[in-house]
Image (cartoon, rainbow, N blue to C red):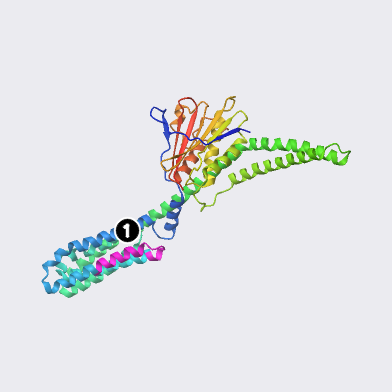
Amino acid sequence: MAQVNRDAEGLRSPGPGTPPVAVAPRVSLPGAALERARLALVRGEPSEAAKGERQRLYRFAALLILVFAYRDFAVPWPGLLRPLIVRLVWCAALLGCGELLRRPGPVSYRAAVRIAGVASAICCGYLGICVGGTRGFITLWLPALPLAALVIAQEEWVGIVLTGLAVHVMLLVTCAGEGLPLAAVAGWQANTAASSLLAYFASREYGRRMADEHDALVRLGDSEQRRSRSERLATVGRLAGGVAHEINNPLTFMKANLELLVEDLTGPRTLADAETREMLDEVQGGVERIRRIVADLRVFAREEAADAVESCDVRAAADESLRLAGVRMKSHVVVELMVPPGCPAARITPRKLSHVLVNLLLNASDALEGRADGKVWVRVTEERGGVRVSVADNGPGFPADVLQHAFEPFVTSKEPGKGMGLGLAVSREYVDQVGGSITAKNRAEGGAEVAFWLRPA
């Protein structure tokens, strides 16, 4: 079992002049937010960010409607009141639909988009009737409303169709009121039909692309889960030899103690009561040691719930990780754990933090294999309002070509069969998912150091 020394001292951040550092690039991997976006896409509802953007578009459109009210002043005063009221109603409809689409659920979103499209067609058409008719500035833009609906809600083809139909009706009313000839009416309707068809087919194509993107996200999520599971099982396999050794040690002295107790009970009594009690206590301690090792291994290997709370006691996770990694680290490896008192909780699940630490400890153990003076330092400090954790060793360090790609999958300096090259890649994924950062470097005094920073819980 590895020797563990615990201290409360912290670690200062490296200053200028330190060796080259490999910084893990930020990546977009399936996490809780991406899972919510996928579910929203399945339900036919965009993400909250997309809803917010579309609400801002509705507000901007309402602002433009009020800004262009100056063109209505060409109308004599008795008739100026009607276009002003229409503009106010139009703005109120857009703002109300903007609030409606932010409500949860696809029904509210679809209703908001469709109501906004139809209301815009009716208000724009009536405003055109009030200000210049078919010769006015407003009516000229009326056939383009289906394209505007496409810009705001690309996937809502039903809303685009309803907007196009409402535009057709308002143009018929406008042309009928002016008594235009059939050829002129057909021209207006043809323009509207062209823009409506263009918007419709663009919306359907967008929907197909979104469906393909959804399938790709599902496949990516499944792939990442399988990769994480395979790496975790590989870590359990790396621990298996040490676990067998750690379980065999207590079993050996438990068996010897039980044999002596059986001989004492079946033959003449040779053991005093105090000796019997001491031997039973040793057996009980051995059983507890085996139970703890098996329990830690089962917790480590078990799948984590999707809704696990992202808050972790760093000290408890570090202790658990040292118990797990210690079954494989040889007795000549000295591990120093330094955690300041009152260290804040980190924004990560305990399982993921334990997995990251076990990966880093096992990597350090592999690097120190065969050395009699192997030493590992695990330092926890408060930094930038969060928690910084570093794992350093006095081994040979990273080869220069490996350091540049340390956090890429399947990059390893170990011999074939001793590692898959996924430990740092999965650790990077876990840290990145919670908004943290991770770096790797070679220490100036020799050895490697991997450090990661986590946000406070």
Does the magenta-highlighted stretch encompass residue 91? Answer: yes
Q: What residue did someone put label 1 on?
A: 54
Q: Which residue is depicted at the point 46% across and 30% down?
A: 402
Does the magenta-highlighted stretch encompass residue 322? Answer: no
- The image shows residue 41, relative to residue 351, as above or below, that is below
- Can residue 17 be seen here? The reply is yes
- The image shows residue 220, relative to residue 323, as above or below, that is below
| Mark 1: secondary structure | helix
Q: Which residue is depicted at the point 44% across and 50% down?
A: 217
Tag 1: amino acid: Arg
Chief secondary structure of the magenta span?
helix
- Can residue 120 be seen here? The reply is no
Q: Which is nearer the eye, 9 or 292? A: 9
**Residue 201 located left or right of residue 13:** left
Q: Which is nearer the eye, 355 or 407? A: 355
**Residue 242 located left or right of residue 318:** right
Q: Position of residue 231 (x, y in %)?
A: 54, 41
Q: Which residue is depicted at the point 27% across and 60% down?
A: 59
| Numbered range of the magenta stretch | 89-108
